[in-house]
Image (spheres, grey):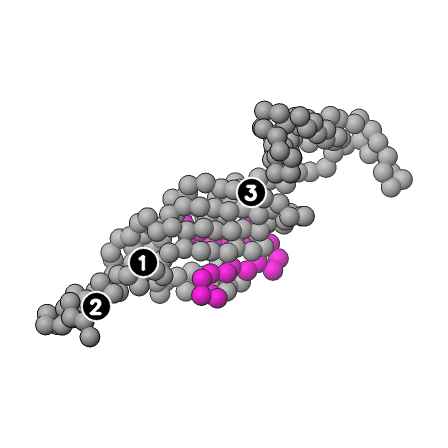
Amino acid sequence: MPVTQITLLPGYPEEARERLVKNVSLAVASVIDASPAGITTYVSEAATYQRDGAVRRQGGGSLPNASDLALAYLQAMEAGRLDEANTHLGPGFIMQFPGKWTMTSLDEFVQRSRARYQFVGKHFERFDECWAGDVTIVYCFGTLHGRWLSGESFEGIRFIDRFEFRKGKITRQDVWNDIGEVRMAAAQVQAQVAAPANTRGCTP
């Protein structure tokens, strides 16, 4: 039955304390073979302490929930609110798409997307978080829906977005989806329909 104590100065928001014990409990469960019911994590407060020659009595700030930030960013992008979406980006931001398609600005992404579809939206299934040093990594899973340039609708296309957050800002977004495969399959069907009748079903 692992028990973990976290000591904080007073002043941290209750929401931050709750996320802290939840995330630390998850970290414990990833290392120690124990059931969730057997893992205890709690916060205690130190009213005053000294570090590096300075006496401290008040806690510092906390970072926002990265999954909530990822959702807010994606919703702003879908609604075309680029100014709002840009507020979530940090220094050195890059976007990596399938086919070695790399961009460093949202304007560039929008321009490239106009050549592929009229509109695309996302149905979100879940968000997962993990941590590596000062980086919070968020995975977003779901399906895409929208309209091709032809005006035909599409839906149910799988996607995964991976975000790296530093100090509450997105520094990297990696995207994987099945749009390329779906478009290729549709093109093959159209080619078969357009083929002369006497060649359909023939094999060399």
Residue 123, position as x, y percentages in the image = 38, 44
* Label 1 vs 3, first from the N-terminus: 3
Q: Residue at x 51, y 47 (%)?
A: 139
Q: Which residue is mark 2?
A: 191
Alpha-carbon span between mark 2 and mark 3: 43 Å
The boundaries of the magenta stretch are: 77-101
Q: Considering the image in quadrants, where does the C terminus appear? A: bottom left
Looking at marks 2 and 3 on the same chain, the residue that comes earlier in the sequence is marked by 3
Magenta-colored stretch includes residue 172: no
Q: Amino acid at mark 1?
A: Val
74 is higher (above) or lower (below) than 48: below
Q: Is residue 78 magenta?
A: yes
Structural crowding at the residue carrying mark 1, measured as other residues with C-alpha within 10 Å and reported as few (<14), some (14–19) or many (≥20): few
- The circle drawn on residue 182 is 1
Residue at x 29%, y 52% (from the top left corner)? 154
> Distance between the Cα atoms at labels 1 and 3?
29 Å
**Residues packed near mark 3 inside 10 Å, few (<14), some (14 to 19) or many (20 plus):** some
**Position in image of residue 159 (x %, y %):** 41, 51
Q: From where the camera sits, is residue 21 visible?
A: yes
Q: Name, please, the residue furthest toward the right.
A: 53
Question: Considering the numbered disc 3 on the image, is that residue within a helix, a strand or a loop?
Answer: strand
Residue 13 sits above or below residue 166 on the image: above
Q: Quadrant of residue 152?
A: bottom left
| Farthest bottom residue in view | 204
Specify which label sits upstream in the sequence, 1 or 2.
1
Q: Which mark is residue 12?
A: none
For the question of whether residue 14 can be seen, the reply is no
- To which residue does mark 3 refer? 129
Left or right, residue 31 beside residue 75: right
Q: Nearer the viewer, residue 16 or 185?
A: 185
